[in-house]
Amino acid sequence: MRKQGMLHKLESARSEGLAQFIGVSFDHFLPFDNNQTSVERMIALIKSDAFDVIQIPMSLIRIERVEDQILPLAAERDLGVVVNFPTAGGILTSDIGIFYNILGSYITTPYQGALLFSLLHPAISCVLSGMSTQAFADENCALGSIIENISGLERRQLWDNIQAVGIGPCRSCGRCAPYTQGIPVRQILTYYDAVHRFGIQAASPWYEKFREQVLACDTFKEADVVCPEGFNVLGEVKKVYR
Ligand code: SF4
């Protein structure tokens, strides 16, 4: 560790009793950088053993690699896991699509379903939620009693039922981003999948705003070469607007 580096300063703060734990946070949609996806960089940070807590984005609009790769590693290393972005930027506050069929008998509002999803996983310690009004705070805190009354077996079954719905083919790796003329391909494909696979209609304005820009494109030269899923990337994005 560098003597005057940030980690050194954080370690000093901890030894002086100013902090108890050191954490690191990441986002699904960070750029592909230094030949690594954001998930791969997070894995490297976890394996550095420098951190006690990680903050990860997770919601019912799922991007499977977090669940497959980050959560098992965090559990193995006994890290605290804080989930941010549980409503996918507010999309899930009023609409959780087909997941209401799975969670509906436990919750009274979609927002509670969005928060409950992450809390079903045993590696997750905490979910961050909006508490800007008394009503929001009451709605969210009611989850404490809800989750307490769901047995371990039921939680696993609910988790498995949600996973069984599947996810879309784009893995949000970001490799194609330099070649897509500023069009946010992974976000468009992720939110399109949220509408068509999960029935979350509230996600459609997110990609509709790019309709004209996408339809005006002729080529995403080189994007297909780097896509690990072997997509005709522009072709996949145009399918969203057909
Ligand atoms: S379209 Fe392909 S390259 Fe682009 S983010 Fe999705 S999986 Fe990665």
Image (cartoon, helix red, strand yellow):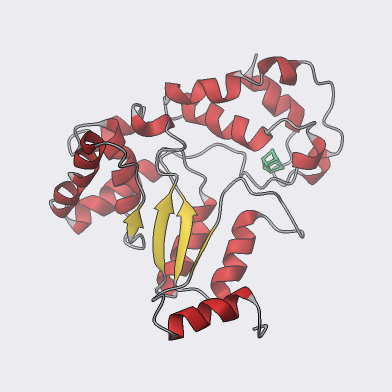
**Is residue 32 found left or right of 157 in the rendered image?**
right
Q: Is residue 49 visible?
A: no
Quadrant holding the N terminus:
bottom right
Relative to 30, say whether 223 is above or below.
Answer: above
Quadrant holding the C terminus:
top right
Q: Quadrant of residue 72?
A: bottom left
Residue 127 placed where, x, y %?
Answer: 35, 52
Q: Residue at x 66, y 81 (%)?
A: 4
In this view, the residue in front, 232 or 27, is 27
Relative to 223, say whether 20 is above or below.
Answer: below
Q: Residue at x 24, y 31 (%)?
A: 109
Residue 60 placed where, x, y %?
Answer: 41, 40
Relative to 171, say whether 199 is above or below.
Answer: above
Q: Residue at x 48, y 26 (%)?
A: 203
Q: Residue at x 29, y 38 (%)?
A: 113
**Is residue 142 found left or right of 242 in the rendered image?**
left
Residue 110 placed where, x, y %?
Answer: 29, 32
